[in-house]
Image (cartoon, helix red, strand yellow):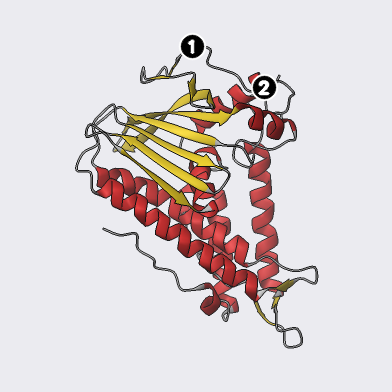
Amino acid sequence: ARVTRPFKTTMAMVRSVMTGCRALAASASLASNASQRTPIRGASRGVRHSSSGAFRVSERVAQFKQSFSSTLNEKRSKASAGASGKVVRGASAVVLCQAALKESATGVEFPETIGPLTCLGAGVREKKIAILKVKVYALACYVEAEGAKAALAAGETLLSGAFDKAICLQLVRDVDGKTFFEALNESVKPRLALIATNQATKENEDGDFMSEVAEAAEKAEEAALDALEEIGDYFLSKSKLSSGTKVMLRVADGKTLQVSAAFADGGAELELESAELCEAIMDVYLGIDPISPAALDAFNAGAAKACA
């Protein structure tokens, strides 16, 4: 099974103002209600400006965009806060987990460091099946200590900071590769669409839509979807991921995604180049709508404590 691409291209979609309005409304719904995620890849934001050759944003679309931006900014402000409710800042290095850290709900232990990365904290991913919450995997966040120190002190968040970071997962139940990837794809794909839309609708200082920017965003999204397909091919080739399987999703230099999986057969590693895919995958765990809010709270608390 391949990653489906049900979206029309950006440049085709920009010819319809009403489509742009509907896409922006869908974007606002995604930001405010996690259960109503609507992919909006390549949506339009404006109409062609006859004198400049650019696309001038219509009044109705601008209103949608302003409302959407306000919602995102409010949630990003909350996401950047640590457990104390204050923005994570400080001057000391991020150095936690002096001994192996044990995730309390699953009993899974994570090492203090993995290579140059230091552990911030751990949590658990649960999935509701009928009326029961089932533990699927434990997860921990790792960061490059000095880079994280500087970024957090400057007011960045774990997601926005330009330092190497990783999410390490350990399954606590058997899952087949198809199910694992489908869950990841379901979370990543709408985020990729939103990233592409935001990139494609950037305006110049005159408030005009720039066609060359939209074209670049289209190409970047295509590359990200290609990379996501490679991840899918890898996991879909696995008939079973046994309890205890470890998966690491690591971002290096803000644009290189390293996928390491320690399966019973020895595992493998993928290295994929896409800044957009890196952002989308990290957003699943560190963004405004994380897949495990309690885990993100633990990561932010760990960062705040290290920077106190």
Q: Which mark is residue 295?
A: none
In the displayed structure, 29 sits above or below 43; it is above
Q: Secondary structure at mark 1?
A: loop
User: Which residue, given by chain and number where applicable, does mark 1 sit on?
Assistant: 99
- Residue 63 position, x and y percent, is 70, 66
- Residue type at numbered disc 2: Ala
Q: Residue at x 30, y 27 (%)?
A: 172
CB contact under 8 Å: marks 1 and 2: no
Q: Residue furthest bottom?
A: 50
- Residue 109 position, x and y percent, is 39, 18
Tell me how many marks there are: 2
N-term mark: 1 or 2: 2
In the displayed structure, 133 sits above or below 51; it is above
Mark 1: few, some, or many residues within 10 Å (few <14, many ≥20)? Answer: few
- Residue 221 position, x and y percent, is 50, 62
- Residue type at numbered disc 1: Ala
User: Which residue, given by chain and number where applicable, does mark 2 sit on?
Assistant: 93
- Residue 254 position, x and y percent, is 57, 45
Q: What is the spatial separation of the Cα atoms under label 1 and label 2, in whole angstroms?
A: 17 Å
Q: Residue at x 54, y 41 (%)?
A: 252
Does residue 212 appear to the left or right of 117 in the view shown? right
Q: Residue furthest left?
A: 239
